[in-house]
Amino acid sequence: MLPDQIIEGDVLIENGIIKKIDHHVFVSDSGRLIDVEGKYVCPGFIDIHVNGGIGVDFSNANLNDFLKAVSFHNSHGTTAMLPTCVSSPIQKLRSFLGIVKEAGKRNPSVLGAHLNGPFVSTKRAGAMKSEYVLKPSIDDLNMIIEGFENVLKIMTVAPEEINGIELIRSLLSRGIIPSLGHSDASFNDARKAYECGLRHFTHFYNAMRPLNHREPGAIGFGLINDDMTMELIVDKFHVHYAMIQLLLKLGGLSRLCLVTDATEAAGMPDGKYMLGGIEIIAKNGVVLTKEGVPGGSSLTMDRALANFIETSGVELLQAIKTVSENPARLLVIMDRKGTLEEGKDADLVVLDSSLHVCLSMVEGNMVFSNGLKVL
Amino acid sequence: MDSVISESVIEISGNYISHIMFTKDFRPKTGYEIFDVSDMYAVPGFIDLHCHGGFGIDLALNLDHGFEYFASKLAATGTTTILLSLVGSTKRNLIEVISKAVRLIRRGGYPRIAGLYLEGPFINPRRGGGIPADFVRPATLGEAIDIFEAGEGHIKIVAIAPEIEGVMEVVDFFHKNGVVVSMGHTECNYEEASRAFSNHFSHVTHLFNAMPDLRHREPGPVGAVFDSKDATAELIFDCIHVHPSVINLSIKVLGHDRIIFVTDSSPATGQPDGTYSFFGRKIKKDGVVVTEPNGLLAGSALSMDVVLKNAMDIMACDIKAVNKLISANAAKRIGIYDRVGSIEEGKVADINILDKDMNLRMCIFNGDVIYNEL
């Protein structure tokens, strides 16, 4: 699958890099041949918001378990991810960032971290413990990220809080992407954040003030400003399909980054699990706290993509951008990832016609395969 | 047809636009009065589909004595055609009001009453907005037939809440008889609204107002309109009822052909701040905001000339597009575009002349100058 068309052809991979894509690539002798005839070779999925999986909560895991959950998501086609941690005590956030840094050395699909807090709004904390929510503070930010400046990629913030705008400026100056989320921002609050450079939303529509016709809030601001990008949880629960259609009508396809927001319940049977110290209950694909507040999902990226195609009617070639190219653009890593092009990292996923993952590969390493002939 | 005329001469003979020619081709004829409006815009007369009154007059309650005064003041706002929006406290009262309105329509004159817009009585009392709850009744085919017959073919739009009991046969009846069935004053959810749009509902009464919000897990009627293929929607454009960014959002989603700007004007339109009576209740005008004692919005203090200015602001001064939303679309919606709604040869001469700042300088109705500040 090329950026703008699907061709029948071969992909030659050398030293973790896509060496050649063509209708027919001649190979000499060494190397392995994988037969993927009749299947889609797609750019690997990039999940910029994932809290865990297969019984492991990233925010509370040792390195081994952490890597297990990373592998689980690899097996569902995610070849790059930002493990995510909700609002937690500063020391906890530091140890989380430490583990993410270590995990990245062991598994290159771990690109860095997304902190979904702590500088958010207690009014829109969702399934977070509100005692861990902090007022925006540059000092606290410094404490959290000292030594991890290159690990933290995205930080979710509530710009309407006092010093929220200063925090956004500080993040931008360090090359960290500020993302509006868990926020009660009004339309004007969102505009102020936009004016100082914020361009992204954390799980758009969820955990923010609903759009009202007299106070459109951050949602209203985001919908009409088509240079803003947004995460979207497409699990047929968090967001009604008509609201996805609405985004698409507003030029949203190039703006959308599908995310899983997966908890440790992903890949596990229905039951009780944890998310950042809060008990959550997974049932029939929906994850709620005891109080009935949505608490992440049990999604994987392959499922998110299939749901998106099913509910939006967008074709695979276009839909794939929401799980690869768009997040790669956001993270400014299009030079290495996001599309299948010669010279880029060999991050790819092979899907059959029902969009099941048959193989996934991170920088040329086959991290998952199922039912394929290796010749 | 562009509906914005520049570098041209518009020749009016009798009630009609007889000829539109380039200025260079124009040769003065005898017997014609000439108005030089160089550097100005000629746009179609405004059409207000949703109008309850103004200048202190509550039209539904005061058609006999109030209409003439209302009309004498309206010309200065450029509205040439209206739908009279009516409510009635009881079935008998409503039928009485409709009969009076029909007589007024027959009489003719300014403004052109293109028909009647019934806001109820088959609406959801929980979303009555400015309409008193005792003006609302369960839907019955019997009442629908009686109302329709009293209207003698002049009822053009009926606002109905699709979720209320007994509504389907009433909707069928109105639809069969050529009445536009409009979703309004409703608490319906997305599913109900979507079903309604596939069952003869084709219009929405003041979209966003007097209905549930657009929510991400329950998009409601607003989500259903955004999702529908061809339903049209009114928007009250006073920047109070609906935030300008939400108007902008609606235009982006629905395009320029499916939105109709209306005033939903109350008696407070064109009046100084103060207290007025609307549907028999006290309302307070404070600037452009009109509220009931409980703080809810009760109609607007809008007139169409203000709508035009608001629209120019938000639509990047694209006056051709603005004209669609304040005249052409309304005319098409109620089937009178063959006569009004654009400036074309053969159409009725309803023309507004605007200066560069979009101030109304002249209003021509039916070929007659009825307002002149040139």
Image (tube, rainbow, N blue to C red):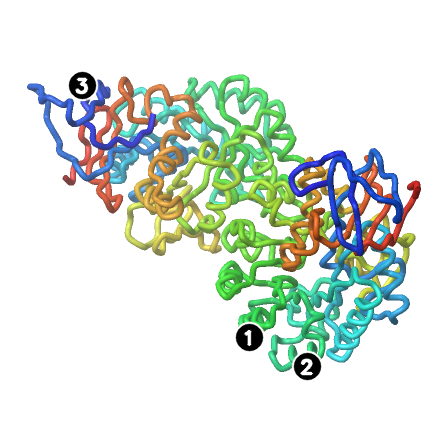
- On the same chain, marks 3 and 2? The answer is no
Q: Position of residue B175 (x, y in %)?
A: 54, 21
What kind of element bears circle 2?
Answer: helix
- Residue of label 3: B13
Image quadrant where residue B14 sits: top left
Give the amino acid at mark 3: Ser
Instruction: Identify the secondary structure beneath mark 3.
Output: strand
Judging by the rendered image, the residue that carries numbered circle 2 is A143
Q: How many marks?
A: 3
- Judge the density around disc 1: few (<14), some (14-19), many (≥20) Cα neighbours within 10 Å: some
Query: In the shown orientation, is residue A42 left or right of residue B171?
Result: right
Query: From the viewer's perspective, is B219 left or right of B282?
Result: right
Q: Residue at x 79, y 60 (%)?
A: A109
Q: CA distance from mark 2 to mark 1?
A: 16 Å
Left/right placement of residue B323 relative to residue B36 reads: right
Amino acid at pointer 2: Met
Q: Name the residue beneath numbered marker 1.
A: A163
* Type of amino acid under label 1: Asn
The chain letter for the residue carrying disc 3 is B
- The residue at 59%/21% (across/down) is B172
Residue at the far left: name it: B30
| Within-10-Å neighbours for mark 2: few <14, some 14–19, many 20+ | some
Q: What residue is at 81 percent from the left and 54 percent from the top?
A: A364
- Distance from disc 3 to disc 2, alpha carbons, whole Å, reads 81 Å
Q: Nearer the viewer, mark 2 or mark 1?
A: 2
Q: Is residue B314 visible?
A: yes
Residue B187 visible in the current orientation: no
* Residue A61 picture location, percent across and down: 86, 69
> In terms of depth relative to the viewer, which is nearer, B292 or A341?
A341
Question: Dividing the image into 4 quarters, which one contains the C terminus of chain A?
Answer: top right
Q: Within 10 angstroms of label 3, few (less than 14), some, or many (20 or more) residues? A: some
